[in-house]
């Protein structure tokens, strides 16, 4: 089959690789019909190379048609249309029954002290082959795939794999009071969808912050009060407080993460680490790695006293400095973590109708072939061509 593989920093390629096969009696093989490129994939493209091997298949936002099932699979059958959550979760362990599928005890990666394995996401999370490919082996065939109806295009359902549950959890964790206010930092796919979900769930004021014109214009068109960071980098906190009676918003969602704009020293450290041999870079990142924390520091500044900061952007630093005095003084609550996909599916799936309240049908800005994947990664990383969300069609 054809698959998009990681080769080196900023070097991904389409290669012919062996087709996946059933390994366990509850496995299924899915023929991929749509697979997204996630902002988190750019961390692999740029920062997390020391935890990848050349040839690793990327991608964790996939859906398709069941082609083959193991002898113990009863929940799906060949021909069924399914979405694959990015968490590799069993659905039956203690953590999964608590709604913490991203902490699945069956697939936790003990070698790195990590939570549940993820499709297409480094040794830190199990080095499981990803879904930017023609076929994908999916374990836990009775509990992991999400069956979806025939009819509507893949665009209606594919975001159940990651974008929708990640944004939904970000809003849930933000604990925005009815009619309250929230600032969303970063208007990429997750931040953009988080603004829509916040509005849908009753937020009175949704502020979005970014520095890319296409993203700002897109969110503004959906009724978000957008602030261009290029104009407000020095007075962002004051501007948000002016919009909220001098307090700051009830909540802030950080949808940016480890590669935030700014903090040149941390950016330089990340770049230098990428030049080290993997045998040196891996332990350095695990024990002494730092993130670019501009977005996180901004969140702490923008949230009102007693408010909540919800982190959905991925962070990977081991020794990130935190302003504990400021956080304690403001009595800030923090919620964070990988999205627990299946926890939110029952609440989201009923919204994926012809009424399309979250705008999923037109959410993708680009539809490309799998063979165009390497060019899409480069364009997404450099924020070119109005690219906000890309779906690849194998």
Image (tube, helix red, strand yellow):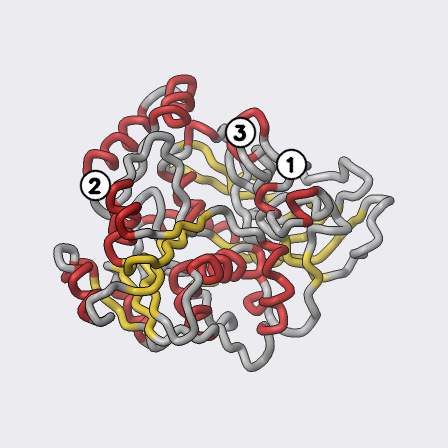
Instruction: Name the residue tied to disc 2.
Output: 263
Residue for point 43% across, 47% down: 40
Q: Using residue 144 as the reference point, say whether residue 248 is left or right of it.
A: left
Residue 334 x/y as whole percent: 40, 50
Q: Taking 210 as reference, is 91 left or right?
A: right
Is 86 drawn above or below residue 352 in the view shown? Answer: above
* Image spot of residue 195 (x, y percent): 39, 67
Q: Nearer the viewer, residue 170 or 157?
A: 170
Of badges 2 and 3, the one in the foreground is: 3
Using the rendered image of the protein, determine whether residue 68 is visible from the camera's viewpoint: yes
Q: Does residue 27 lie above or below 163 as drawn?
A: above
Q: Quadrant of residue 137?
A: top right
* Residue 107 badge: 1
Task: In the rendered structure, find residue 113 and report the number of the disc placed on it.
Answer: 3
Question: How far apart, in angstroms, are the residues tagged by discs 1 and 3?
Answer: 11 Å
Secondary structure found at label 1: loop
Q: Position of residue 321 (x, y in %)?
A: 28, 35
In which quadrant will I find the N terminus? top right
Q: Is residue 92 above or below residue 163?
A: above
Give the residue drawn at x 32%, y 60%: 385
């Amino acid at each position: 089959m054809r698959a998009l593989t990681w080769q080196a920093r900023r070097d991904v390629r389409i290669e012919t690789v062996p087709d996946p096969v059933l390994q366990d009696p509850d496995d299924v093989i899915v023929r991929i019909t749509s697979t997204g490129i996630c902002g988190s994939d750019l961390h692999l493209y740029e920062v997390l190379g020391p935890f990848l091997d050349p040839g690793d298949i990327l991608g964790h936002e996939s859906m398709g048609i069941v082609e083959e099932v193991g002898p113990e699979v009863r929940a799906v059958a060949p021909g069924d249309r399914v979405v694959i959550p990015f968490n590799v979760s069993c659905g039956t362990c203690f953590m999964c029954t608590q709604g913490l599928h991203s902490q699945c005890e069956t697939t936790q990666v003990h070698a790195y002290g990590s939570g549940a394995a993820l499709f297409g996401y480094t040794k830190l999370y199990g080095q499981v082959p990803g879904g930017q490919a023609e076929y994908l082996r999916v374990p836990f065939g009775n509990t992991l795939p999400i069956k979806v109806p025939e009819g509507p295009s893949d665009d209606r359902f594919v975001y159940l794999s990651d974008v929708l549950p990640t944004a939904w959890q970000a809003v849930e964790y933000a604990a925005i009071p009815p009619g309250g206010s929230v600032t969303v930092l970063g208007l990429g796919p997750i931040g953009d969808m988080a603004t829509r979900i916040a509005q849908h769930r009753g937020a009175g004021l949704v502020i979005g912050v970014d520095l890319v014109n296409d993203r700002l214009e897109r969110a503004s068109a959906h009724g978000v009060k957008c602030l261009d960071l290029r104009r407000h980098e020095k007075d962002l906190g004051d501007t948000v407080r002016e919009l909220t009676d001098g307090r700051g918003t009830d909540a802030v969602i950080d949808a940016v993460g480890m590669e935030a704009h700014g903090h040149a020293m941390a950016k330089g450290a990340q770049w230098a680490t990428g030049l080290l041999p993997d045998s040196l870079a891996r332990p350095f990142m695990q024990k002494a790695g730092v993130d670019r924390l501009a977005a996180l520091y901004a969140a702490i500044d923008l949230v009102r006293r007693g408010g909540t900061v919800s982190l959905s952007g991925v962070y990977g630093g081991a020794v990130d400095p935190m302003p504990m005095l400021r956080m304690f003084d403001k009595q800030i609550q923090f919620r964070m973590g990988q999205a627990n996909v299946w926890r939110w599916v029952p609440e989201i799936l009923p919204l994926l109708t012809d009424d399309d309240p979250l705008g999923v049908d037109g959410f993708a800005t680009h539809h490309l072939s799998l063979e165009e994947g390497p060019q899409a990664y480069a364009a997404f990383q450099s924020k070119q061509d109005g690219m906000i969300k890309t779906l690849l069609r194998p």
